[in-house]
Amino acid sequence: MKNPVPRTAAIHDMSGFGRASLTVIIPILSNMGVQVCPLPTAVLSTHTGGFDNYSFTDLSDAMPAIINHWKELGISFDAIYSGFLGSSRQVDIVSGFIDDFSRPSQLVVVDPVMGDNGKPYATMTRELMLKMRTLVNKADIITPNFTEAAFLLDEPFREEVSESKVKEMLLRLSEMGPKTVILTSVPVPGNKKVSSVVAFDREDGRFWKVDCTYIPAHYPGTGDAFASVIVGSLLQGDSLPIALDRSVHFVSTAIRTTFGYSCPSREGVFLERVLPNLNAPVTASSYEILD
Ligand code: PXL
């Protein structure tokens, strides 16, 4: 039976302070009319971007019991959406979850959370980063940032990139398994102040691009917000370019809303101020199709 309210499993960590992962994903998707069932991978006092001495509890041992109970209950998911993992063992756990809960026309979205700005996050291990490729192979859609794409492709991180190189990267990432690849924080040639989101859909062979306005600040959790809006839009039936548009505009507005204050960027974007925007009609569309 079709779920009257679309339902997603959300396989991410719970970071208590700093507006990242589940504290961002749950409100965004709930606001977009999607039921979120969290399968937590780790519990942290804060995210790892800009805080020292955070507590980190790996939940690898607790996940199988949660999954088994969900199996007993026969829960079905319209989407499976994974992100930050707490150990390399969790790649096998999530992979098994995707196999066990697979159903027709389900969306499997893997955000291969590993790092940003050319560097891995503090809790990443080489083993986890290598194994993330197995999970990417199982996804319909992946949403790496430019740093994570370089890790997946085993390439050096570059500050500048041509459009043809971006297309080549998207094609190679798609050859790793996913039908759709959405690459964020892509540097724009000749303009160090702007980045873009570029996507490729293997089914129709089309490339899409949305430019993002520049704000000289970096906020943790914006990748989680971006991917969550993608999941919500696609579950609502949007096309890929409109989903890209909605995500870029939502995250840009969240960043601009926050930047006007002088709060530490490690506290994340003021999501609470902008959540209602998710229910506004799409009025500003700026996607482009690439030749
Ligand atoms: O937003 C990605 C993310 C998720 N989870 C944890 C993180 C980060 C980024 O820093 O530290 C724990």
Image (cartoon, rainbow, N blue to C red):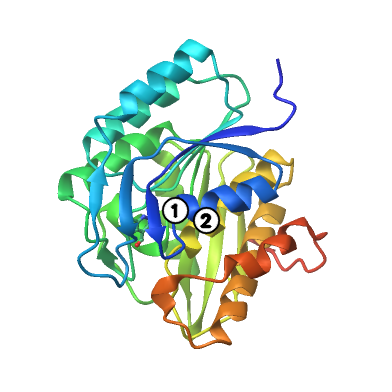
Q: Nearer the viewer, residue 3 or 177?
A: 3
Mark 1, secondary structure of its residue:
loop
Q: Is residue 185 visible?
A: yes
Q: Residue at x 36, y 56 (%)?
A: 149
In the image, is residue 134 above or below residue 128? above
Q: Amino acid at mark 1?
A: Ser
Mark 2, secondary structure of its residue:
helix
x, y percent for residue 198: 55, 61
Q: Residue at x 26, y 34 (%)?
A: 60
Q: Nearer the viewer, residue 209 or 109?
A: 109
Image quadrant of residue 47? bottom left
Query: Does mark 2 have its CB less than 8 Å from ligand 1?
Result: yes
Query: Does mark 1 have its CB less than 8 Å from ligand 1?
Result: yes
Ligand 1 quadrant in view: bottom left
Q: Residue at x 46, y 15 (%)?
A: 71
In the image, is residue 9 above or below residue 55? above
Do the residues bearing badges 2 and 1 touch, measured as CB atoms within 8 Å?
yes
The label on residue 42 is none
Look at the image and tell me in which quarter the N terminus lies: top right
In the image, is residue 157 above or below residue 38? below
x, y percent for residue 175: 41, 40
Q: Amino acid at mark 2?
A: Val
Q: Residues within 10 Å of mark 1 (few under 14, many from 20)?
A: many
x, y percent for residue 69: 43, 17
Q: Residues within 10 Å of mark 2 (few under 14, many from 20)?
A: many
* Residue indicated by mark 2: 24
Q: Nearer the viewer, residue 183 or 273?
A: 273
Look at the image and tell me in which quarter the C terminus lies: bottom right
Q: Is residue 161 visible?
A: no
The label on residue 21 is 1
